Amino acid sequence: PPKPSSMASYHAQLAQVFWVAGNGLFHAYSLTRSYATAKSLKAAPSEAELTALASRAVLAALSVPPSSPVLDLNLLEYDLEHEKTKRMAQMLSFPSTASRATLLAEVVASGLLEAAAPEVRELHALVERKQVPLDLAAAAAPVLAKLAASDACGQYDLPLRRLVALRMLQQMERLYLTISIDKAADAITVLQWPQIEALLVWAVKKDLVSLRIDYKLGQLNQQRNKADAAASSEVRESLAGFASALDAV
């Protein structure tokens, strides 16, 4: 079998290849494997180096663009791109179910998140909760600024800013049927409006939000049928949570 030192170098180089190729998912998986291998070396890297490796792996996982859970469940098994990803994952000894969700679950379960720097753990907590505050951008800004200044983590700055903005758009969609473009842009301070606009177009195509831009009225509008469905879901979840709380009394 290959020496652990050779495997650590292999996964590090593989991560670089996938980053250049624009494959964020396999880039992140490669970094998690690089960290695990480096940790097992007889002459293990220093604590600071391991923290930097863990931080990169977690940020790379967070930087993978989210996907719609509906699409994951119903359509992707028949999608050629999904099959290509599955075959490549098997070839590289990554999980055949490789996805952002499974990777983040692995990052938490393996203790990799705990090994990362405090600001990385803070960012993970901010963006991966079920519902985020509408001042998420303000809360995340100092963390993002610190990470952007890091040589090891600066490359993830834009994907992470897009993630923060996406989480805010999703939360706005839960709370408002319409919201003015100016108000949305003022809240999402981590991106400029043209970047928010491009993100919104992409997110609609990926079925991550249903907001539409109405330039005439200067608003972001939610599709009525999806708004009704979302509201019904929120009500059901709230009632279920209330019932569970009553049972626990």
Image (cartoon, rainbow, N blue to C red):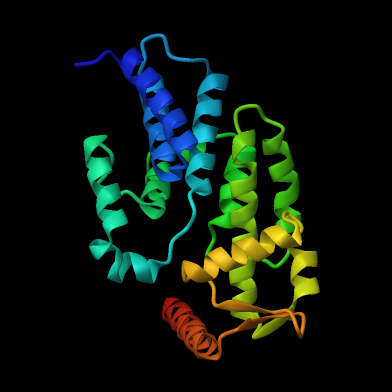
Could you tell me residue 119's position as x and y percent?
64, 40
Image: 138 above or below 51:
below
Image: 168 above or below 29:
below
Image: 61 above or below 185:
above
Instruction: Locate residue 89: give its quadrant.
Output: top left
Q: Is residue 128 left or right of residue 220?
A: left
Image point (37%, 45%), residue name: 106
Q: Looking at this view, name the residue that lies furthest to the left.
A: 1
Total numbered labels placed on residues in the image? 0
Taking depth in this image into account, of 220 and 36 the one nearest to the observer is 220
Instruction: Locate residue 129: give its quadrant.
Output: bottom right
Could you tell me residue 112's position as x and y percent?
45, 36
- Residue 131, visible in the rendered structure: no
Could you tell me residue 204's position as x and y percent?
53, 71
Q: Looking at this view, name the residue that lies furthest to the front.
A: 216
Taking depth in this image into account, of 209 and 216 the one nearest to the observer is 216
Image point (34%, 64%), residue name: 72
Could you tell me residue 225's position as x and y percent?
50, 90
- Residue 135, visible in the rendered structure: yes
The quadrant in which the N terminus is found is: top left
Q: Is residue 20 left or right of residue 134?
A: left
